[in-house]
Image (cartoon, helix red, strand yellow):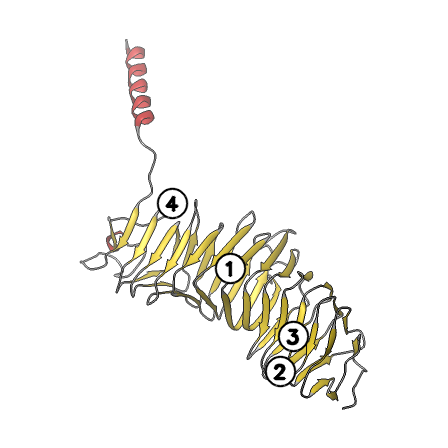
């Protein structure tokens, strides 16, 4: 009898478990307007949300008009909406992971998402950043694209990076007709550990002051940069660092220097390029062998500086000099011949 009683209880529990519905995604809305036992604006305070609870992987979270929510610990979300004049701040030590099935982040025109010094916004799968607002990665903050498979970050909102973009997933692409704006920022490419290969594909406009290099936390990884959009030096310096393993591009894409105070600097060999170079005004610095079969425009006060004897710029496509003064290694040019070398000069 006792054995049959145990069997009956086990069967009843199994039946209850079999009919219990799986956990469902919850739609959370910020509601930090009533007495709460924890930090008033904290993401991980259940009383700051309606329904009461903490948003997590698979859930959606909406920051309402006039509300500010701060991420101070490690959190996860699948759908994030920052509406009205709402604000989301990822503070020092805080990590927000955007993960799960079909994730998205939407930022309204008057709202904002800020990654502060010491904070990290980690995107773990293909997603869209949308809206007319902006995502600001401040000095010391990190936006990390980190998955085990190919990832695409589609931009229709502004992404402003003054800190770091860390690309640790292979075959990562940033796409759409948007502009990445940088101010003394860095792009770090490569796995956080191991000897894997990471290729960062740019399909938008990269503009500002930025260094593109290998992830410094792991010297064993392979870091490739592929420009399939526009890399434009404008009021700053864009440096392609010598720690990269390869630099490639595609037919019709552009490398551009568009301001007298701007510099585009190749510190890494790139001898198989096919894209167009448009230099002027501003400076193109060649500190490694560079070859392109695309077009080369050298105009409007442009300068090309070849650093030493081992470096050169060779254009096998159409190259030439436009109007105005042009300089090669400090001398004024009225014509250009290739390859350009460190000991080459021009008579004006």
Res 19 quadrant in image: top left
Query: Mark 1 packing: few (<14 Cα in 10 Å), some, or many (20+)?
Result: some
Marking on residue 281 = 2
Disc 3 target residue:
278
Q: Are marks 1 and 2 in contact (CB under 8 Å)?
A: no
Disc nearer the start of the sequence (4/3) = 4
Distance from Cα at disc 4 to Cα at disc 2: 49 Å
Query: In terms of depth relative to the viewer, which is nearer, 111 or 273?
Result: 273
In the image, 48 versus 240, the foreground residue is 240
**Distance CA(mark 4)–CA(mark 3):** 46 Å
Q: Secondary structure at mark 2?
A: loop
Residue 176 is marked as 1
Rounded to the nearest angstrom, the CA distance separating label 1 from label 3 is 22 Å
Give the mark toward the camera: 4 or 2.
2
**Secondary element at image label 1:** loop
Q: Earlier in the sequence, mark 1 or mark 2?
A: 1
Residue farthest to the bottom, as pictured: 348
How many other residues sit within 10 Å of disc 3, few (<14), some (14-19) or many (≥20)? some
Left or right of 165? Residue 221 is: right
Query: In front of the other: label 1 or label 4?
Result: 1
Q: Is residue 268 above or below residue 80?
A: below
Q: Which residue is mark 4?
A: 58
Does 149 appear above or below 114? above
Q: Which mark is residue 263?
A: none
CA–CA distance in space, label 1 to label 2: 27 Å
């Amino acid at each position: 009898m006792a054995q049959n009683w145990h069997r009956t209880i086990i069967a009843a529990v199994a039946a209850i478990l079999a009919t219990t519905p799986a956990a469902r995604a919850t739609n959370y809305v910020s509601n930090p307007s009533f007495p709460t036992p924890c930090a008033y604006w904290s993401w991980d305070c259940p009383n700051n949300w309606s329904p009461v609870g903490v948003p997590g992987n698979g859930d959606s979270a909406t920051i309402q008009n006039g509300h500010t929510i701060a991420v101070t610990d490690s959190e996860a979300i699948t759908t994030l909406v920052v509406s009205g004049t709402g604000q989301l701040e990822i503070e020092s030590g805080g990590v927000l992971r955007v993960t799960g099935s079909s994730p998205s982040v939407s930022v309204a025109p008057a709202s904002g998402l800020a990654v502060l010094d010491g904070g990290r916004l980690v995107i773990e799968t293909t997603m869209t950043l949308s809206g007319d607002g902006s995502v600001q990665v401040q000095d010391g903050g990190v936006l990390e694209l980190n998955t085990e498979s190919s990832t695409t970050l589609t931009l229709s909102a502004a992404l402003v990076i003054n800190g770091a973009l860390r690309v640790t997933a292979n075959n990562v692409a940033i796409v759409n007709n948007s502009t990445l704006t940088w101010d003394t920022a860095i792009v770090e490419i490569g796995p956080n550990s191991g000897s894997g290969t990471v290729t960062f594909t740019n399909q938008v406009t990269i503009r500002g002051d930025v260094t593109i290099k290998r992830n410094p936390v792991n010297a064993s990884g392979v870091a490739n940069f592929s420009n399939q959009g526009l890399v434009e030096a404008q009021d700053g310096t864009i440096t392609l660092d010598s720690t990269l393993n390869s630099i490639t591009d595609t037919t019709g894409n552009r490398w551009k220097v568009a301001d007298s105070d701007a510099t585009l600097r190749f510190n890494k060999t790139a001898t198989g390029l096919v894209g167009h170079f448009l230099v002027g005004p501003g400076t193109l610095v060649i500190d490694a062998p560079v070859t392109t079969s695309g077009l080369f425009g050298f105009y409007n006060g442009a300068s090309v500086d070849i650093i030493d004897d081992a470096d050169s710029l060779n254009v096998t496509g159409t190259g030439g000099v436009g109007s105005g003064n042009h300089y090669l290694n400090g001398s004024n040019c009225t014509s250009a011949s290739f390859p350009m070398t460190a000991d080459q000069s021009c008579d004006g």
